[in-house]
Image (cartoon, helix red, strand yellow):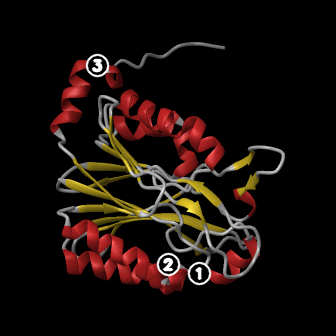
Amino acid sequence: MRAGLVQLSASDDPAANLPLTRALVREAAAAGAGFVLTPEVTNCVSSDRARQAATVVAEEADATLAALAADAAALGIWLLLGSLALRSDDPGGRLANRSFLIAPDGRVAARYDKIHLFDVDVSATERYRESAAVRPGGRAVLAATPFARIGMTVCYDLRFPHLYRRLAQAGAEILTVPAAFSPVTGAAHWESLLRARAIENGAYVLAPAQCGSHATVGGGRPRQTHGHSLAVAPWGEVLADGGEVPGVTLVDIDRAAVAAARGRIPSLAHDRPFEGP
């Protein structure tokens, strides 16, 4: 199976982002990708919570989801819509940060709401409180496809290895990590963490990313993201790096490599109970 990682520099205007995303999804499919992946918050990247809340809609009304599901069906591909910012039924009005796996017939095969939310003071001037705007999910999701079993995660989940181990021990062969990573933490940790999750679990890690400076229609400070969409093999080697500009990165996936890595280091079967601390 050939995978195509779509790297975007999405703005805070979903209507403007959609044609650019669709073009890159088609480009990936035209290059032979049967599994195409887009980044976190494909529909709307914004550092202005009020702007984002006023812009996004509920899942059933989201034009990005509808259009890309139709494209998946027209192209006959599996599509991971990395995540969408969506209105939810949260009593406090918080949004969902939801990843979708779309089958080649256009149906939603699996949904995953981001569990771990980015509440971090990166520096004196870079502060994030995702939980103020987003409702956390509470369920890990493993999706079966004809080419692999897929464990779905999103961005900050990457720092919680127990989630990935649970998915791998349940059978995940590909771990997806769509992201909009901070440039500071991305430069320091992005590749190392992705490689670690691949090595620990003997799984492919596919991580399509947002990149660059994100245009704002509603005003406010443009958000910056790290880019470098990565594909990592089950033995830990980086197979492809998307760099720092929008585009498509292609990589060939062989599930036999998962079995081979787990056969060499069968650590998923070696967990032992212990006491303390």
Q: For residue 182, say whether it is visible.
A: yes
Circle 3: residue type? Ile
Residue 17, disc: 2
For the residue pair 243 and 269, the one nearer the viewer reads as 243
Identify the residue at image location x=33%, y=32%.
237
Residue 277, quarter of picture: top right
The CA span between labels 3 and 1 is: 46 Å
User: How far across and down, in percent of the image, does residue 101 sit?
Assistant: 35, 64
- How far apart are the two marked residues, 1 and 2, measured between alpha carbons? 6 Å
- Looking at the rendered structure, the kind of residue marked 2 is Asn
Q: Which amino acid is tagged 1?
A: Asp
Label 3, on which residue? Answer: 265
Q: Secondary structure at mark 3?
A: loop
Is residue 32 rendered to the left or right of residue 203?
left
- Depicted 88 relative to depicted 40: above or below: below
> Helix or strand or loop: what does disc 2 sit on?
helix
